[in-house]
Amino acid sequence: MPREGTVDDMRWTVRICFLLFLAWAIFMVSPFVGLYDLGKAVEAKDLKRIEERVNFTALRASLSRQILGEYLKDKDLDGAELDVATQAGSSVLNPVVEQLVTPQALVDLFEDGWPERATGRSPNGAAAARLQIGYGSPELAWKTFFFSEAQGFRSITIPVPVDQPKDRQFRITMRLKNLTWRLSGIELPAPLREELIKRASIASR
């Protein structure tokens, strides 16, 4: 028959394990709650709350890197030529990127998956899916969780909307800083990147 001290030790072990599991579960869910909160701020057009949930410096770097990469991908350049093309591309694309990194631009982007102000036109339907931040049903919530990719404990990339083909998805990176999950990057679908490059090229003429 187990001694009373042994039983108490087992109870404390079970309690500690349960609390650790609960803390782990809360932490795993927290970036999705942060993204959902951002989505509600977008729906309400609460620009101040959006600013609190977005790291605009990191977002600017993310968009600049991928749009410039799209701009250079078909150019067979290296060395000094690549450096010159990179500088020229940056100067052409930066004005369009700056139009994307404002609270109002994110409202436009999240409402229908297409930033009208940056592209200069409305979406054509085939190129973009609605960037709706919401989990809709337990099945969609589970799929969103399952297909998300964690980078360590402080960063996670979430596909939105998860029920759309990959070439029409946005991949949103949430990063933990000072106990708050903030949007730090958005990987844009290829059609939207191409449209932004066209817009930048026209504007620079």
Image (tube, rainbow, N blue to C red):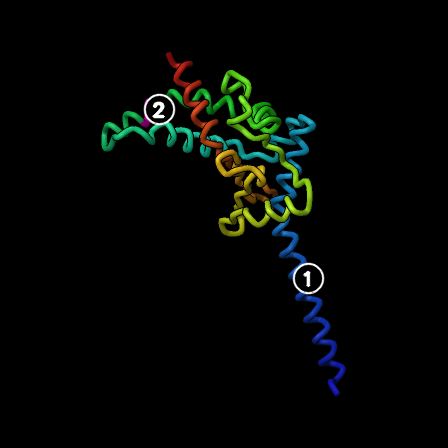
**What percent of the width, then of the height, locates residue 56?**
53, 31
- Mark 1 is surrounded, within 10 Å at the Cα level, by few (under 14), some (14 to 19) or many (20 or more) other residues, namely few
Element type where label 1 sits in the image? helix
Q: Which residue corresponds to mark 2? A: 89
Is 89 contained in the magenta span? yes
Q: Is residue 18 left or right of residue 98?
A: right
Q: Is residue 182 in the magenta section?
A: no
Q: Quadrant of residue 5?
A: bottom right
Q: Position of residue 36 (x, y in %)?
A: 65, 39
For badge 2, the amino acid type reads Gly
How many labels, in total? 2
Q: Position of residue 21 (x, y in %)?
A: 65, 61
- Seen from the viewer's position, the closer of residues 12 and 186 is 186
What segment carries the magenta color?
A: 86-90
Tell me if I can see residue 58 in this picture. no
- Report the front residue among 107 and 124: 124
The quarter in which the C terminus is drawn is top left
Label 2 neighbour load within 10 Å: few <14, some 14-19, many 20+: some
Q: Main SS type for the magenta part?
A: helix
Left/right placement of residue 55 relative to residue 197 reads right
Q: Which mark is residue 19?
A: 1
Question: Is the residue 8 above or below the residue 73 in the image?
Answer: below
Q: Earlier in the sequence, mark 1 or mark 2?
A: 1
Q: Is residue 42 left or right of residue 7?
A: left
The quadrant where residue 39 appears: top right
Residue at the image position 65 percent from the left and 47 percent from the top:
139
